[in-house]
Amino acid sequence: MKTTKNDRRYRNGHLPWYRKKGVPRLIVGCILVLIVVLMVGVSLFWTPHSPVSGNLADRLVAPFHTGKSGTFYLLGTDPLGRDMTSRIMAGGQVSVLVALLTVALCALLSTFLGVLSGYYRGWVDSVLSMICEINISIPLFLIVIMIIAIFGSSVFVLALCLALNEWVSVFRQTRSKAIVQSNYEYVTAARVMGANNRKIIIHHLIPNIVPTTMVFSTLLVGSTIIAESGLAYLGLGVSKPFPTWGRMISEGQAYMNTEWWVSGIPAICIAILVLGVNLIGDGLRIIWRME
Amino acid sequence: MGQFIGKRLLRGLLTIFVTMVVVFLLIRMAPGDPASILAGSMDTDEAFVESLREEWGLDEPILKQFTVYVKNLVTGNLGYSYQYLTHGKPNQPVISLILQRLPRTFILAASVIIFSILIAIPLGTICAMKPGSWFDNLTFSIQMTITSIPNFYIGMILIALLAVKWKLLPTGGYGDFNSFIMPMLCLSFRYIVTFTRTTRTELGQILNSDYLRTAKAKGLSRTVVLFKHGLRNVLIPIVTMIGTRLGGLLTGAVYVETLFRYYGVGELLISAISARDYPTIQAVIPYIAAVFVIVNLAVDMSYFALDPRIRKK
């Protein structure tokens, strides 16, 4: 008999939080992200060596080895003798900043527009849905490349472009959630009790939509980091004050077969961060039971 | 059906129009004189910039300029690309570049989709039939790993191993079949993951549905149940996927073509951007948008073939 499994009390939603299904993923994800964020955070104040200038005598020292000058390098050095550990730590700053900024923009935009569109419907909804349709069917990434090529790439331009590229996927979710929520009785009840539209939206709809925004925005962080590294690889990323991980991968391309760590370590860092964020998003999705 | 296609076509035209407006405005919003921007990185003498100004009608009112731009796009009179010079003069018409490059990217994209579907459907089917098995878990872990690594790094690993170390394939280029394998393989990884996941979730739901139990209860063989009742219904979400993932596929093609020196339209665009070759840029993007519209229309039409319920409506 499968009744116990389908019994209401035993469903994921009714378990204590530590026994819910998505929790292991959430914890592993948090640990991975925390490692990277701590590493990047520390680099704001301290790095073992200088990330921008190196010792040419210690070119391409392997990880866990000591260079000719007698300095120990945890993650080795690059072709110009710069310490990889410091470069990785400092290089993460832009990646993390761009990802956070992009996702914050996406989340704000899509919550606000999603609620407007789902609550008021009518012409607002039609216009926004049409913008969505066009957004999907245009090769938007090419336009993003063009914007960066014309206006140069600062952290803000990059974040704005990536947000432009990705907000639609969150907007669709928040919109459909807003439609479902605004048809519930509690919204009608609030209106009967004299709440105006603004009050309903701020006090009733938005708190109910925040979980959706959180899950789908978290799932965007990964693709944003990958997209940023890709732009950096194409030479369209931010390169000041420090090279980003994507740029470092492309710098190490010539050394792939002999000195794998020059491009391998930044790639591993990207992978750890993206994996961590995706696990968090996936875990939250399972815990809050969203499909 | 006619009405449906007409509606979609109209929306497609609107999409192309919006793309053209955006590209047109972006170039004119750029800091500096449009003519010197269009002339790009060339050592421009004043006469050349002047001739460009005339060609693109840059001293005309902005609406007139836009009609000239549209007219040029439609008639294929797109000017010359400024990155290929002979004796310091541009000699490559943009239209011939596009006609040369677009089919290559199209072939790459089409083979990536076909190859990924051929791999992904069997994989997803095995996972869906035994959810929670070691195979399912292994596939999930591999999926998570692949989605976390940037595509271009996977390509770099492929080059390092297959081309440099084992010397099986050329490192890049365009021409024979051998140099085609790696770009396709590299671009396929992500789509294999996506399509496997879709097949697994969709088929998983279908396998638990009532009509499938009925089919089994009727005494149909396992193969008939799986293929005729199960997998046939998976095709629709997968075809939808192709439509929505087209943008990502093109993005991937930009990286892969640059990495493997596969001279397709993505590589053309990137080299045009780094050479500030604006005539090429402002022509290529609307043409790609047009291809997008056509493929999406094809995806919409294929629903009629795949789903009898839509056909009857």
Image (tube, rainbow, N blue to C red):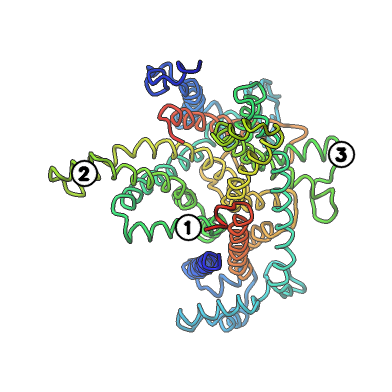
Q: Position of residue B136 (x, y in %)?
A: 64, 26
Kindly identify the amino acid type of the residue bearing the numbered disc 2: Thr
> Cα distance, mark 3 to mark 1?
46 Å
| Residue name at image x 68 percent, y 30 percent | B126
Q: Where in the figure is residue B123, as x and y percent of width and height?
A: 69, 34
Tell me the tag on residue A174. Answer: none
Q: Amino acid at mark 1?
A: Glu
Q: Are marks 3 and 1 in contact (CB under 8 Å)?
A: no
Residue where numbered disc 3 is placed: B167
Q: Earlier in the sequence, mark 1 or mark 2?
A: 1
In the rendered image, residue A24, in percent from the top left (x then y), is placed at 49, 20
Q: Where residue A188 is drawn, which disc sits there?
A: 2
Report helix, strand or loop for mark 1. helix
Left or right: B79 as drawn, with respect to B179 = left
Q: Chain of mark 2?
A: A
**Front position in the image: A79 or A260:** A260
Q: Rounded to the nearest whole Å, what is the CA distance between mark 3 and mark 2?
A: 70 Å
Q: Are marks 1 and 2 on the same chain?
A: yes
Marks 3, 1 in one chain: no
Residue plotted at (50% across, 24% down): A25
Q: Are marks 3 and 2 on the same chain?
A: no
Residue at screen point 69% across, 39% down: B227
